[in-house]
Amino acid sequence: SDCRAECYDSAEALIGDFVCDSGENTPFDFYCPAFNYDLGDCFRADPETRTTPRPPHPCLTSCPAGNWLRKDCSQCEVSRDGMCVEQVVRSCTEGPNDPPGACNFGRCCVAKVDGLDYWGSDCIAFGAYDNCTAALDQLMQEIQAQPRSLASLGSTNLLPLRPAPSAMLMVDCQGSECNTIPDDLVRSPFTGRLTDERVCNVAESKEEGLLCYEGPWASTDLDPLVNCQDENFQYNFCTNRKSRMGKPYNRCCSIFWMDVNNLPTCAFFGIETGTCAQWLEAYRESVRSLPFKQFKNEMILNDCDPIDGDLCNDPKDAELGCPKMVVDRPRVVAHLLPVVIDKDELLAQGGEVPSAGIPWLIILIPVTGVLFFCGSLFLVYKLTRPPDRPLWHSRKAKVVQDDTFVEPVQDFDANNVVIDGVAYGTVRPRELALQMILREQRMMKVPKSLRRDPSLAIADVAEAAFEADLAREAAFQGLSLEDFRSQAASEGIKSPASPKARQSVVQALRDVSPNFNDGRSTVYSPKYGDDRVSVMSPKSLPASPTLSFFPKSLEGRLSV
């Protein structure tokens, strides 16, 4: 029977006939292990193979050097406490059939490396696939293959390869970020006591470094925004204290040579070790195989150290620099520099300092607007305001003087008839009010002492003498002035009165009003006893609005 327990007599030839008898489209089923899956005629799918994924083991790794730092953790994708955090081996690449996490770290390591350029020793944290020793060997090969700086080559007599550094594994652990840098202190070989020096000194250099000019940019292929430390520059030169690997400068150099085209070239830079002459020799060896980099007639212009101070390789120095190579305002960074006008230099060159000038347009626009607005208001006021009418003459009269006006009309006779043959132009009598105003104006120009009527002066003197006598007699008799005046009046002693007082008042009133009517009204004056003064009655005044006041010139005449 077949795989379904059905009899297959006389059908044995179907087994292994290169046709799969699985029972789906065939009468018999030989698709089972008993018939070896129809002797291989039917495809047998292998069971799916499952591999346990490699567990993640993130490790701490040392930050690479760069950006003028020994350890620049800004280049890490993930960093923590001054270390990078990585999870996979950089040189590993997962294949399509590899299980997940095939490149994950299996071990975390720390090693101390001795014999490094400038730093001497360093502790390096790294991760390994499964063996820290194998990973350390590969790391040492990478360190040995790194190119050396020209300053390092010059200081070691141009040895292209540094002495093989040595390494010692310090930490080999398995676990998430378990490889922290040890903070152990070095023990003194003489006393056996702990010193302040750490076994793993991974900190930045304690030295600030000597500030040096580096450039010029066009000759040394420097990018000012990339190769200038903290983007500090002056002229067309960077001002750096360290190399990009964080090594502080110990000397500043200025070198001159003739290039392959016989053009003068100057180079300014700083070095962390050695001398400028050693650097120049190392540079010569590095470009020996490059024809377009060849040079001749080289000369060391300046080789200065910290004793000379920062920026000792000044390119503007007439003796030790190259002033012609200096560009005060390079086009590359012109947008970063403020515009500074050197007045002294302009005056020395015979020029004048350009000035912005007075912004007349900005000033004239608002001023014109204000003037236009005020002019418009004045024009509207003049157009809407009724014209002034002269008080004493018509608008068309010709003013000859302040009191004389010629009217452009013909004269009339007593019967109010136009006189024939008389030309236009009539001078009419002055109004009474105008006469009084003019008289007042003329008298205001005369001293007040001369405005008084002379006829009143004698009466005033006599009255003053009489008052003085009364006061003296009252003092002799021990009486008051008023009591003694009453006693004198009862005895017939009277104040002298000027006979011209009434005539002066009447004449004054006639001067004011030519139509004065000599109607009389008696006014009693208690000051002068029984004397009576006749004055003009108010009813006899002509009905004129101009008589509602009296000129000041009449005050003296009416005082009696």
Image: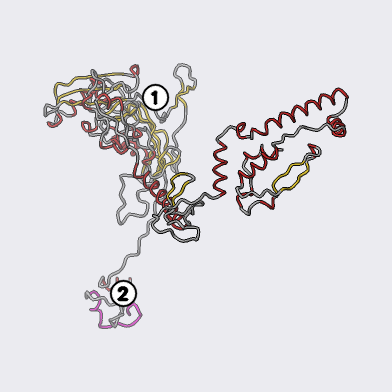
For disc 1, the neighbor class at 10 Å (few under 14, some 14 to 19, many from 20) is few
Q: Are marks 1 and 2 in contact (CB under 8 Å)?
A: no
Task: Residue 215: tell me if it is visible.
Answer: yes
The verdict on residue 348 being magenta is no
Q: Could you tell me how many numbered marks the image carries? A: 2
Q: Is residue 284 left or right of residue 59?
A: left
For disc 2, the neighbor class at 10 Å (few under 14, some 14 to 19, many from 20) is many
At 35% from the left and 64% from the top, the residue drawn is: 47
Mark sitting earlier along the chain (1/2)? 2
At 40% from the left and 48% from the top, the residue drawn is: 371
At 41% from the left and 25% from the top, the residue drawn is: 206
Task: Residue 378: tell me if it is visible.
Answer: no
The verdict on residue 11 being magenta is yes
Quarter of the N terminus within the rendering? bottom left
Q: Residue 438 location, x and y as percent?
A: 54, 43
What residue did someone put label 2 on?
A: 31
Q: Is residue 484 left or right of residue 93?
A: right
From what the image shows, is residue 521 above or below residue 319? below
From what the image shows, is residue 9 above or below residue 236? below
Q: Residue 152 location, x and y as percent?
A: 27, 25
> SS at mark 1?
loop
Q: Residue 253 location, x and y as percent?
A: 26, 22
Query: Which disc number belongs to residue 207?
Result: 1
> SS at mark 2?
loop
Quarter of the C terminus within the rendering? top right
Image quarter of residue 162: top left
Distance CA(mark 1)–CA(mark 2): 82 Å
Q: Nearer the viewer, residue 363 or 47?
A: 363
Query: Which disc number belongs to residue 370?
Result: none
Q: Nearer the viewer, residue 29 or 411?
A: 411
The range drawn in magenta is 1-16
At label 2, the amino acid type is Tyr
